[in-house]
């Protein structure tokens, strides 16, 4: 079984020392979804939710949250992201919004937590903006889809 990286030999929470790790280009992609009523999705798509443009607000909230992940998660390193995007997809079933976040950086540690945080906060923003009209929304399936790292010169490793 793999050793927990955020626990020191005494069993106490500890920030991982990344000072000896190489600087690499890193990318993480996370996904999740918010299930909602068709009527709610119609309101979102027609920009008639009372609080404003739901997806624009959720996109900005997700990006901002990714940038602040090191402040939100106690043992995460504060990272200067080089790119973050949050995208939405509405399947034909019209019963959910699929959320995908991609985060990139050139650094000594990965950006999984930033991508996951972006998806989570984007979903929470949709929930907050629509809670007055939809009492059965459900945020689900938040997960890391992929993470890659590549040397900054050439060559690639995953």
Image: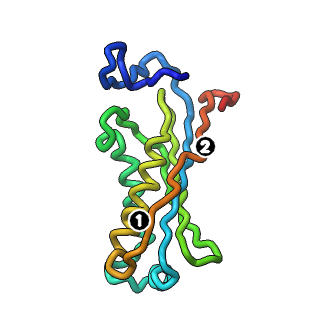
Residue identified by numbered label 1: 58
User: Taking the image as drawn, is residue 77 in sight?
Assistant: yes
Q: Relative to residue 47, is residue 129 drawn left or right?
A: left
Residue 152 in percent (x, y) is at: 60, 29
Vertical relation: 38 (above or below) 137 = below
Estimate how packed mark 2 is, as few (under 14), some (14 to 19) or many (20 or more) residues with alpha carbons within 10 Å: few
Instruction: Determine which of the numbered discs, if any, sits on residue 152 in the image.
Output: none
Answer above or below: position of 103 versus 62.
Answer: above
Secondary-structure class at tag 2:
strand
The percent coordinates of residue 40 (x first, y second) are: 45, 81
| Among numbered discs 2 and 1, the one appearing first in the sequence | 1
Q: Quadrant of the N terminus?
A: top right
Residue 59 shows in the view: no
* Closest to the observer, 79 or 138: 138
The residue depicted at 45 percent of the width and 84 percent of the height is 43
- What residue does disc 2 label? 146
| Number of numbered tags placed on the structure image | 2
Q: Residues within 10 Å of mark 1 (few under 14, many from 20)?
A: many
- Tell me the residue at 49%/59% (across/down): 140
Q: CA distance from mark 2 to mark 1?
A: 22 Å
| Numbered disc 1: secondary structure | helix
Where, by quadrant of the figure, is residue 77 drawn? Answer: top left
Looking at the picture, tell me which residue is in the foreground, 122 or 133: 133
In the picture provided, is 57 more to the left or to the right than 145? left
Residue 87 percent across, percent down from the top left:
53, 62
Q: Quadrant of the C terminus?
A: top right
Q: Position of residue 85 (x, y in %)?
A: 50, 55
The residue positioned 45% from the left and 70% from the top of the image is: 55
Question: In the figure, residue 91 lies in which quadrant?
Answer: bottom right
User: Of residues 106 and 114, which is closer to you in this image?
Assistant: 114
């Amino acid at each position: 079984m793999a050793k927990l990286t955020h626990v020191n030999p005494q069993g106490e929470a500890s920030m991982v020392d990344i000072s000896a790790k190489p600087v690499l280009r890193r990318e993480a992609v996370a996904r999740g979804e918010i299930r909602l009523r068709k009527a709610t999705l119609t309101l979102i798509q027609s920009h008639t939710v009372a609080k404003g443009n739901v997806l624009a607000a959720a996109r900005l909230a997700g990006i901002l949250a990714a940038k602040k992940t090191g402040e939100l998660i106690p043992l995460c390193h504060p990272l200067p992201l080089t790119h973050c995007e949050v995208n939405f997809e509405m399947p034909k079933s019209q019963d959910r919004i699929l959320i995908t976040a991609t985060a990139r950086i050139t650094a000594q540690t990965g950006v999984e937590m930033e991508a996951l945080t972006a998806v989570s906060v984007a979903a929470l923003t949709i929930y907050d903006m629509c809670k007055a009209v939809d009492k059965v929304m459900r945020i689900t399936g938040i997960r890391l889809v992929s993470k890659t790292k590549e040397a900054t010169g050439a060559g690639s490793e995953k």
